[in-house]
Every structure is written in structure tokens, then in C-alpha cells.
Image (cartoon, rainbow, N blue to C red):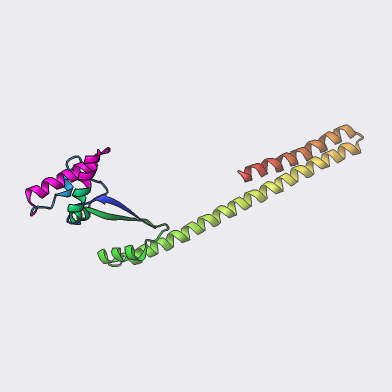
């Protein structure tokens, strides 16, 4: 994904760090416009300094706007050289794009193969970890279901025994608690899985 943005760069076209001229208190935009203009006359350098000053002002009067337009027309080439296009690129995933990978290979021979091997081992590790997590969750769920079934069957057995001993009220109470517990666990489990 490439996003172009404009920023002021040195007139010689060399790259600088991500700091813009506004981050560097020693260099103003007016200095930057005429920085590499040793061959310009003092009048041209003065106009370029004025141009830089006008470009940094927030509110311009009509006279200043006209002066700015005239200066821009007169110094198109200087302004075009002073303002370069900066391209920022980003990539997603473990491997950089081929052009960047080729750059690594040019700097350190064999590094592209190491980067590809590293990405492959990371993918394998991630898959093993995900498989382990899924198995652990499945085992935990199965264990919980088996224990819930054992508790429910025990409750129904006790309720059946109470019914055989002519304690219908106790049997009804145990059955209601048993079924209520299963329904509550089902609803609570659903809410947790939805979140």
C-alpha cells in the first residue's frame, strides 16, 4: 500500500529522516528554498527567502497573495526542486515485498533465504500453537459435558430413589434443581461464547 505525501526536501534530492523542516528549528522553509542556490544572484536569493516567508504565513493579504503568485511564477523550477514527493510504503504479513527482499539480499547475501525460512518457521509455529489451543478447548468442553452428565444423572437417580421412598416433594425439588442447573449452565455458557 503506497501513500504519497509532499514535504520539503533539500534541493539536491537527498533523502532525510522522517523529521520535516518544521521539526528542525535551525532550518526554516525560506532557508530551504534557497539552500543550494549558490549560483543565484543576491536578488534571486532575497526573492526565494521572501517566497519561503510568504509560504509559512497563515493569513495573507491581497498584496501578499499577488506577490506570492508572482514569485511562484518566476521561481517555478526552484520551488519544484525544493519540494520532492515522499512515498511511504507499508506491507502486511511476515514477508516484505520482493523489491525490499531483493534489497536485503543485495546488502547481505543469503539474507532473503533466511527471511523466507524464518517466515515459514513462524507460520508452522503459529499453526502448531493454534492446533494445541483448539485441542485443549475441545478436551475441556468434552470433560465439562461428561461431568455435567454425571451430576445430572446422579441428581435424577437421587430424585428417583426419593420417589420410590414416597417422598414426592423431595423428588420434585431435586428434579427441578437438576433441570434448572442444566438450563442455567446452558444459558451462561451461551452468553460467554457469544462474548
Classify residue 49 as left or right of residue 147: left
Quadrant assignment for the N terminus: bottom left
Classify residue 95 as left or right of residue 128: left
Q: Quadrant of residue 164?
A: top right
Q: Quadrant of residue 52?
A: top left
Q: Position of residue 63 (x, y in %)?
A: 22, 40
Q: Position of residue 50 (x, y in %)?
A: 16, 43
Q: Position of residue 128 (x, y in %)?
A: 51, 58
Q: Position of residue 96 (x, y in %)?
A: 37, 61
Q: Quadrant of residue 27?
A: top left
Please tell me whether the stretch drawn in magenta is mainly helix, strand or loop.
helix
| Rendered view: 144 above or below 61 | below
* Residue nearest the observer in this picture, 21 or 143: 21
Asked whether residue 64 is drawn in magenta, I would say yes
| Rendered view: 19 above or below 110 | above
* Residue closest to the far right: 166
* Residue nearest the observer in this picture, 4 or 68: 68
Q: Is any part of residue 40 visible from this angle?
A: yes
Asked whether residue 159 is drawn in magenta, I would say no
* Residue in the picture at 67% in, 46% down: 144
Q: Is any part of residue 23 visible from this angle?
A: no
Give the magenta-colored segment's residue range.
Answer: 39-68
Classify residue 6 as left or right of residue 82: right
* Residue nearest the observer in this picture, 80 or 103: 80
* Residue in the picture at 24% in, 43% down: 65
| Rendered view: 7 above or below 23 | below
* Residue in the picture at 62% in, 52% down: 138
Disc count in the image? 0
Quadrant assignment for the C terminus: top right
* Residue nearest the observer in this picture, 75 or 150: 75
Amino acid at each position: 500500500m503506497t501513500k504519497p505525501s509532499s514535504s520539503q526536501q533539500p534541493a539536491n534530492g537527498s533523502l532525510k529522516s522522517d523529521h520535516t523542516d518544521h521539526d528542525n528549528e535551525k532550518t526554516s522553509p525560506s532557508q530551504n528554498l534557497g539552500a543550494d542556490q549558490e549560483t543565484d544572484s543576491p536578488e534571486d536569493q532575497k526573492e526565494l527567502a521572501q517566497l519561503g516567508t510568504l509560504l509559512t504565513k497563515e493569513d495573507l493579504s491581497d498584496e501578499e497573495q499577488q506577490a506570492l503568485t508572482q514569485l511562484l511564477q518566476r521561481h517555478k523550477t526552484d520551488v519544484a526542486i525544493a519540494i520532492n514527493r515522499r512515498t511511504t510504503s507499508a506491507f502486511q504479513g511476515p514477508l516484505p515485498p520482493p523489491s525490499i527482499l531483493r534489497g536485503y539480499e543485495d546488502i547481505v547475501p543469503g539474507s532473503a533465504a533466511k527471511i523466507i525460512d524464518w517466515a515459514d518457521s513462524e507460520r508452522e509455529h503459529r499453526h502448531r500453537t493454534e492446533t494445541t489451543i483448539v485441542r485443549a478447548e475441545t478436551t475441556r468442553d468434552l470433560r465439562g459435558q461428561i461431568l455435567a452428565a454425571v451430576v445430572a444423572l446422579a441428581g435424577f437417580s437421587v430424585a428417583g430413589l426419593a420417589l420410590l421412598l414416597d417422598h414426592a416433594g423431595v423428588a420434585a425439588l431435586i428434579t427441578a434443581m437438576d433441570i434448572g442447573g442444566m438450563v442455567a449452565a446452558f444459558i451462561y455458557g451461551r452468553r460467554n461464547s457469544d462474548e
